[in-house]
Image (cartoon, coloured by chain):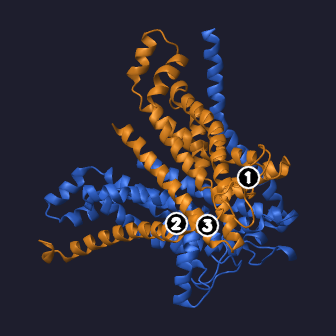
Chain colours: A blue, B orange
Amino acid sequence: MTNLSEKVMRIIFMLSATVSILAVIVICYFLFDQGLPAMVEIGVTNFLTGTLWKPLEGHFGIFPMIVGSIYVTAGAIILGVPVGLLCAIFMAKFCPKRLYGVLKPAVDLLAGIPSIVYGFFALMVIVPVVQDLTGTSGKGILTASIMLAIMILPTIVSVSEASIRAVPESYYEGSLALGATHERSVFFATVPAAKSGIMAGVILGVGRAIGETMAVSMVAGNQPILPDSILSGVRTMTANVIIEMGYAEGLHREALIATAVVLFVFILIINISFSLLKRRDK
Amino acid sequence: MKNYRHHPFSLLLRILVTLSAVITAGVVLFLIGYILYHGVPNLTLPGLFSWKFTAENQSMMPAIINTVIMIVLTLMLAVPIGVFAAIYLVEYSKRGNRFVKIIRVTAETLSGIPSIVYGLFGYIVFVITLGWSFTLLSGVITMAIMILPLIMRTTEEALMAVPDSFREGSFGLGAGRLRTVFRIVLPSSIPGILSGVILAIGRIVGESAALIFTSGTNPVVPKSLFSSASTLSVHLYTLLNEGRYTDQAYATAVVLLIVVIIINALSSVVAKKLSR
């Protein structure tokens, strides 16, 4: 009897473990099955490098969306990484213990806030400010980048902080003993040793920024055009899907799924580089 | 400020790190303060918490109930699978097994997929291919796949933290593997599993992109698994999309924020218990 239940449960455990494999296979199958034929029908180069997105007239070029996703993500990294990294250094090496007890939960809270709330906040606060300062509609690359920078801040801070803390104290002490100040020791002995961990944090941040949908679609302007300045409105790949999926039919719908396939490939590349970095870390 | 006169560069570095911390803390304070300031007065809008949703009151009560239903059903589906999968990985498989490696890689892949891709996947499979249209069940299954890697990873860590001497003691007394897992290993890793569950609840509460095209945007309490039901985050999305309900949107954002703060407080309580 016990022997039987041992065997049965063992099989149940194993089946549960295969669910994640199954899920990846099913997700890939449905995305590629529905997206690739459209890509072929439109023409792969036409689809990826075409600059005109007019579904009703049969123009399906997602190049502006690819560029849009890259621009807002790059903007988020440029704004978010310096602040996040320096904040992580502060938390790991400069922060008094009592202040840490407040700062750490605050950063964690930032990670838990729903993206729709970020979008709402950006719409109510960042958009009007950019509008006033520049005289444009206020929705565009700059606004989306500022908001995404805030959204990826907790990822950058917590991953960087953990990897800075993992550096052996002897590095820092050795540098102190050679006469360097506390700041110099931290910046030139400890932080460089945490480089690959920090990079991993940045890559995670890129993944979060490029996959962000709701918040970005609220403040990026969503014009499917090639942007000519950082104030110009853009549409990201994610926004393209969420905006038009509700009413798309036929080839149009498949083209949207194909957009998600391209996004998916981007994410896979990011994931692979993340795990390569982690492996090198060991 | 003792020695900085001779080390201007060090002073600069110190100013930079402090400034960054101030910016980060300032953003958090401002964001929360702004939403509370504009949202709390709107919590008293007539009918905002009435049981029935109408076009006039834009009540968020059904959305709150839907969120709870969504959390309970998703956890019922994902927690057993995730915990069992982790048990297999830690207690049953041999280390360095190829199968285990594939499971780890796929779980990692799952956790990196953006929610819009999950939403699209759910839409293609449940809404279109199976023809269910927008249903609670579509949303639940989509969310369950989304939080599965999280549950698996936290449970795995919790199980690995249980010292091998516990298992050896149990085996030594003649218990089988199954009994050891359920009587010895699982009970001592409950706090770790719980912390994963709390994180998962946070993700379900905050999710919107994956649910809009699976469980839909209908702000009423569903009659069955096959009716459409919007959660609180999706409700906020619909309010913003309409463009006329900014006051209600602020109030909804406040409720979401309070839920997130409670979840974070809970998870830090559990984390403290863990580190003891």
The quarter of the picture where the N terminus of chain A appears is: top right
Give the spatial CA distance, label 3 vs label 2: 10 Å
Residue tagged by mark 2? B40
Question: Would you place residue B42 above or below residue B123 in this image?
Answer: below
Residue flagged by tag 2: what amino acid is it? Val
Left or right, A35 with reference to B98:
right
Circle on res. A217? none
- Residue in the image at 40% along x and 59% along y: A106
Q: Earlier in the sequence, mark 2 or mark 1?
A: 2
Residue A203 versus residue B237: which sits nearer the camera?
Answer: B237
Label 1: chain?
B
Position in image of residue B13 (x %, y %): 27, 71
Question: Would you place residue B146 above or below residue B37 in this image?
Answer: above
Number of numbered discs: 3
Circle on res. B45? 3
Nearer to us: label 2 or label 1: 2
Nearer to us: label 3 or label 1: 3
Identify the residue at the far front of this view.
Answer: B46
Nearer to us: label 3 or label 2: 3
Position in image of residue B137 (x %, y %): 74, 45
Residue flagged by tag 1: what amino acid is it? Ala
Position in image of residue B141 (x %, y %): 70, 44
Give the spatial CA distance, label 2 vs label 1: 26 Å
Label 2: chain?
B
